[in-house]
Amino acid sequence: MNSSASQGSPLGVDFVDLHRHFGEVRGLDGLTLSVEPGELVCLLGPSGCGKTTALRILAGLDHPTSGEVKVAGKDITGVPANKRDMGMVFQAYSLFPHLTTADNVAFGLKLRGNSSAERRKRAGEMLELVGLSEHADRYPHQLSGGQQQRVALARALAFRPSVLLLDEPLSALDAKVRVQLRDEIRRVQLEVGTTTLFVTHDQEEALAVSDRVAVMNAGHLEQLATPSELYSSPATPFVGEFVGLSNRIPAAVDDGRVRLLGHSVDALPGSVSGPGVALVRPEVVGVEADEAGNATIASLSFRGPVTHVVCTLASDAAVGPGGVTADQEITAQIPSGHAQRLTLGQRVRVTIEPVPVLVIAG
Amino acid sequence: MKRWVRWLILLLFAIYFFGPLVSTFVKSTETSPGHHSLDAWKALVTNDEVFHAIGQSLLLCVTTVLLMLVLLLPTMIWVRLRLPQLSRTIEFLCLLPLTIPALVIVVGINGVYAWVNYFFGYSPWVLTFAYVVLVLPYAYRSLDSALAALDVTTLAEAARSLGAGWFTVIVRVIVPNLGAGILSAAFISVALVLGEYTFASLLNNYQTLPVVIALFGKSNAQVSEAASLATILFAAALLLLLSFASRRSRGRKGV
Amino acid sequence: MRRVRSLASWLGVLPFFGYLLIFLMIPTVVVIVGAFRDNTSFSMSNIRALGDSAVLEALWKSVELSGASALIGAVLGAVLAAVIVAGSPTSFLRRIVTSLAGALAQTGGVALAFAWMATVGLSGTVTTLVQDVFGWNMGNSLWLFDLPGLTLVYCYFQIPLMVIVFLPALDGLKPQWREAAETLGATRWQYLTQVAIPLLRPAFLGSLLLLFANAFAAYATAAALISQGQSILPLMIRAARTSEVVLGQQHLAYAIALEMIVVVAIIMTGYALVVRRSSRWMR
């Protein structure tokens, strides 16, 4: 770890049964969540799920209706925002326009009474950490959106906070800048080692940068898991449908197992029993040319390294409790090299890898 | 800011601003010492001179707003569509009346108004020509923000590609989308014209409402006071109405 | 073909330019030229008359009045604006205040003079009240028609104007700046002194200058309040124009008007310079 950028040992964060009501609306409905010291946890969910509310309560910019917020085991629910020792990066517009980049970064230090020499040194370190050393004397309006957010990150970390909070920091940026910057943020976070909470609605972003992801919906936690666990073993229907793409195939659960396209696979723990809809990832679906196959190709969509192949299943394909419904489609994601040998309308055989699937209510 | 501090400050300002208005009302009812009635207020309608002046001022409001819209709207839209390089110039010209005081314009406009009077007579409504110049900066600002919020070029191109002529583009495509801006420009102009005294009195002593108010000051102060209060309340009511009409509230990002 | 097309474009703005030429440019030119003439020919006599003690005194009084009302108006107006901006942007309080402010600032003029005469004039409500309670006749000193009184009345439209002009600047203070400062550890005072005030300073100074120009050029209120007298420049112009005694006085009006243009132009240039810097971030 870069000794100049790091600080003392990082601290853990706990949300304990957090409620936040806005009149009739329950913004947060009993959120309980623990973040380990030094890890980066994403709060992921659709608009209105409460992720930003939870972050702002942690920062002290909002107050819970009930429940507690703890840092390193200590209850900080009553501590005012300016005494919480947390660095925060906002979605946009948070840099002070009348100060240069360096002065912006050093702002937290100035408030704490650091000498001018100390501030200059530390600001220089932080700007180097985010790769903006040559822009120290520029003003925010002279920087691009991506650069501004990097300055905001440097500013939030300059005073060595115990927790770093990011409120959709990439949402206001162009797609390409977004991808670059999220890797930057992760790199910096790993180097500095600060416990970090990252709010986003973009599941690809969350899967790419996090140690763990907390999927939220309607004010409560759906699942807290590593990105790969979340992807392959969704615990609830919401997570299954929100994270990644899924085919929805009618199927029935019988004694913990599901019959799909002639195969028998395990049903994941969160599944219903009896008839339902199986969520099948496109990349576990295989497509092979076969004149006696169980499907025909409806469309081919080239996506670069992979191609999405949409197939219409024939009525005698063994799917679901009562057989296949008319025009049941299934999307397969296969390497583009393989897809080049396929044509529209071709008869194919569709298979499924024997991985566990989540079956939700139909 | 603490609640009670806020309300204390508001109370102090309320005293300063409403005090004189209340005083005006009280004095306007004192038709003779110790005797109170609403005679002065009735006179606003019954007194010929005053009533006529009110009518003239209201007429001036209408003619000024119309002429301002006819002059400014097509020009601003035209510049945006065909002569964007002139937009800075137009802006400068429209804000110029802020730098050239009305008093100064009056001093120099005698010659021009001799011609105006020759063609149009001596009725107060000829003040319209000068008034349009006075309201220019405020009307320009309202219309400019309304136009900026609209992508005029794209709208015009879409309409043209569907076969619309320039007149249709301006009148039937763009103007209907400028509702709030036009309303704003109109109401601010009305507020200005209702109280305009410099031109009316110095040019030829046209008998608009403010001039008549000043005239009655010596002989029948109660009527002047009633008319003054009425003018201010009317203008305030208009502007209050305007604030409800503009649905898109400015300054969304409050502190 | 191209030349014809662009010519047609320029025809579209002809009415506008023509209108301004007739009703704005020509009067201004008449004033400027007239200042350098007397009745018959080119002459500097009117310009020189600007140095007369009476004119200089009127200029100074105008400056004093404009400066005092601008300063008081700016400070108090900023306070009032800060109080109403704290609520929601569409609150009823804000609507009422801005509507009344608009009416007082734009329509005021003559009406304001009568409102104040009804309050602190010779037989105004407050004058009578003070006389009854304290036995002191305020009306005796005719203070309403001199600088202190004029300043008080001018503030009646300066404060509202400040509210109208300064509110957008306060609206432009993004909540993210306040929240960012808080998370960085700033107290309320630190936020005000290190972020809010530096950001608002250009707008405040600009508004102050605008208020000065507004008071300097104001005519209606003073004219309605003071029927005979030339204590300030605008009233001096009125006197010079309506003078029956000396015919040549008419041209003095041009010279004074020219002086007014120069002063206001200088102030407005200052305004443009001050505001340009902050316009970038106040969006």
Image: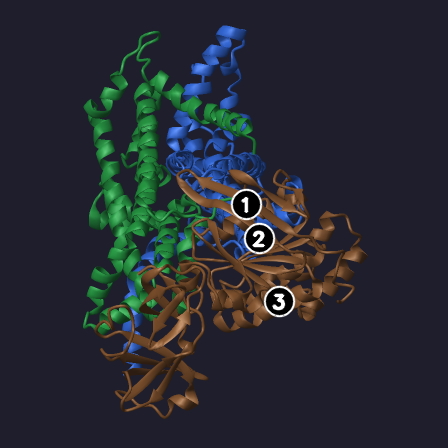
Q: Does residue B158 sit above or below C73 in this rendering?
A: below
Label 3 residue SS: helix
Colour used to depict chain C in the structure image:
blue
Chain displayed in brown: A
Q: What residue is at 62 percent from the left and 44 percent from the top?
A: A81
Crowding at dot 1, Cα within 10 Å, few <14 / some 14-19 / many 20+, comes out as many
Crowding at dot 2, Cα within 10 Å, few <14 / some 14-19 / many 20+, comes out as some
Which subunit holds the residue at mark 3?
A
Residue marked by disc 2: C274
| Amino acid carrying mark 1 in the image | Leu
**1 and 2 marks in contact (CB < 8 Å):** yes
Label 1 – label 2 distance at C-alpha: 9 Å
Residue marked by disc 1: C209
Left or right of A293 on screen, residue B16: right
Q: Does residue B199 sit above or below A44 in this rendering?
A: above
Label 1 residue SS: helix
Quarter occupied by residue A262: bottom left
Q: Nearer the viewer, residue A10 or C144?
A: A10
Q: Which mark is residue A186?
A: 3
